[in-house]
Image (spheres, rainbow, N blue to C red):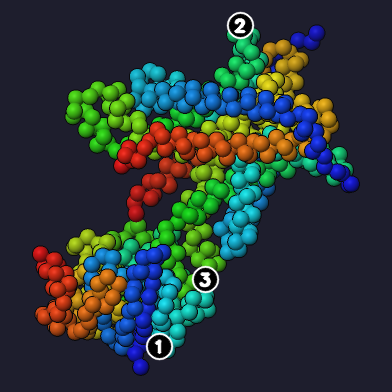
Amino acid sequence: MSLIEITEVRKSFGSNEVLKGINIDVNSGEVIAIIGKSGSGKSTLLRCINGLETINAGTIAVAGAQLLPDDLHLKALRLKVGMIFQGFNLFPHLTAGKNVMLSQMVVKKVKKDAAEAMARRQLDRVGLLHKFDAYPDELSGGQQQRVAIARALAMEPIALLCDEITSALDPELVQEVLAVVKELASEGMTLLMVTHEMRFARDVCSRVVFMHQGRVHEIGPPGEVFASPRTPELQQFLGMQAA
Amino acid sequence: MGYHFEFGWIAEYWPVLLKGVGITLQLIAIGALFGVALGGACAWVRALGPAWLRPVVATYVEMIRNTPFLIQLFFVFFGLPSLGVQMSELQAANLAMIINLGAYSCEIIRAGIQATPKGQFEAGASLGMSRFQTFWYVVLIPSLQRIWPALSSQIVIVMLGSAAVSQIAAEDLTFAANFIQSRNFRAFEAYAVSTAIYLLLAILLRQVLRGVGFTLFPRRAAR
Amino acid sequence: MIQFSTWDIVSNLLLAARWTVVLSLVSFIGGGIVGLLVLFARIGKFAGLRRAAKVYIEVFQGTPLLMQLFLAFFGLGLFGINVPAWLAAGFALTLWTAAFLAEIWRGCVEAIAKGQWEASSSLGMGYMQQMRWVVLPQALKIAVPPTVGFSVQVVKGTALTSIIGFVELSKAGTMVTNATFQPFTVYGFVALIYFALCWPLSKSSQILERKLNVAHRNH
């Protein structure tokens, strides 16, 4: 059985159908890159998996648990799947350490000492233990995103969703974030990432999903997808990326 | 208890109410027109005008914004005549409302001017326009467009505040309510009905100002 | 006829100004408490409460404060009690203040970026937890300057209570004028006292606002 099973998922905004029947199965430990033009539905798909958008049809199951739009099921799902956003979304009124501690304490009811220990461990993992007491506005974009990763990891998810997590970063800060993700991948974390970093997708991912107009247009190992794209749409997309 | 509400008097007194509504509308029309014009002039002085005039305008704005409209009204109507300035109740009400709205709209418009990107001033200057020309042709309209919602709410606030002019016997809607309740001793009903009319006027005025906004600033003016 | 010195005028006005201050404080604090309730109704999960709060705000912001004072004065009287002016004044001003504060604070809650809600959702927090730990702490910070700014409106609003017979600064001004026949001087002093009460509040609101903007630019 796959870890994440996405079956015939459809999603519309008004009369605009953004996802037109998506099927993807993700196995434990897989790193999947979702690529495609803007408007192809790739971010929406990720947001659906986390329950930030409600789907109109189809099913999403994570580790056998169904995604249902009620509070109890949503919370159960979100404890299993963490999400990292393009805009970091750190809580600006809390220090990096408190950012990582908050949800452990209020959602999982972890005691303060244990939450702090976990926060230190996760911040250390992303190389930012020394920034424990820094506020988000005292950190660079890359550091903020690494704190956001630590914050998600502290909830001990079985998979992470990464929504264009390097798109808002200055070019020189992209690598420090990707390095952290690469490290997670090598530790066996299941990752689903929407990304524009083609080299990263090629080097790190086990499979690449090319989305086009709300459908999975091509899917396969990066070697295949990048070396011999079968459809003209993917050829054109990759051509644009190279240019 | 056992109070019975009685609204039959409306049949007799609606012309009084209507006249009051007319005066209230007249007051806000004049107040808004000249008040915003005064505010625009003051905003120009504070943002770009001659240096000696700026503290004068600043004092005026601060004085008005930090004192009640009722006192401004009393000062104009009771105070100024002792300096030899005579005016009718309505003129005093008009003047007080213009002075009041002038100060508020000065601050609102000034905020709009300050939000103008610096490049607009530089572009105007690089095309050989004077400071005033740049202000008039380049800065003013986009600024007004930016602050139109804030200005509109302030005009509605001034309209609602105009209820106080009944206290110098200007015969507005509140004056009409006072008059009616002194005749029929149905104070609560008289004030409830006029309150409802004010609510209606406020909603209507908001719509009218929205319309004016669309006319003054058609879409093509928007960035 | 008794002669009034300038000091007589000012001291009478200052004594009455105490009641302006007391009424302002009572209305502001009472309005703050009621305003919080209205705020939670306005942004809460129950559609019925949301609509009711919206109507409440619309009515109190869309009608003259003077009318609200009249209605409180004569409306409370309908219950057969002889309503003292101070009670009607405090009652109406509290409800009026609550409507404006609720709306100001709603703006602050809505100014919190959507990403904050999404991030806290994705961490598994429920609505109340998001409010308590993520949204309100941030909203509170940006709410301080406009809240302080609105206190100026409350102080100025108390002037209208003179019309239903509450003896505060404005009423005292009218009474002293009637005794001295010096409207220019008396209302001049009344204005100055109001200014002395309001200006520090306006100024601190501005300073707080500026500080907040500077803090935000660092992000």
Q: Residue A101, image x and y in percent?
A: 44, 72
Looking at the rendered structure, the kind of residue marked 3 is Gly
* Identity of the residue drawn at 38% across and 18% down: B52
Q: Residue B169, image x and y in percent?
A: 70, 20
Q: Find out whether the residues at labels 3 and 1 contact each other: C-beta distance under 8 Å.
A: no
Structural distance between the alpha carbons of marks 3 and 2:
68 Å
Q: In this view, does C57 lie to the left or right of B53?
A: right
On the question of residue B112 being in view, the answer is no
Q: Residue A242, image x and y in percent?
A: 11, 68
Q: Which mark is residue A63?
A: 1
> For the residue labelled by badge 3, is the local secondary structure a helix, a strand or a loop?
loop
Image quarter of residue A24: bottom left
User: Chain letter of disc 3?
Assistant: C
User: Chain letter of disc 1?
Assistant: A
User: Chain letter of disc 2?
Assistant: B
Front residue (pair A143, C84): C84
On the question of residue C104 being in view, the answer is yes
> For the residue labelled by badge 1, is the local secondary structure a helix, a strand or a loop?
loop
- Residue identified by numbered label 3: C126
* Identity of the residue drawn at 36% across and 65% down: A16
Which of the two discs, 2 and 1, sits closer to the camera? 1
Q: Residue C43, image x and y in percent?
A: 56, 58
Front residue (pair C144, C97): C97
Looking at the rendered structure, the kind of residue marked 2 is Gly
- Residue identified by numbered label 2: B84
Image quarter of residue B23: top right
Structural distance between the alpha carbons of marks 2 and 1:
88 Å
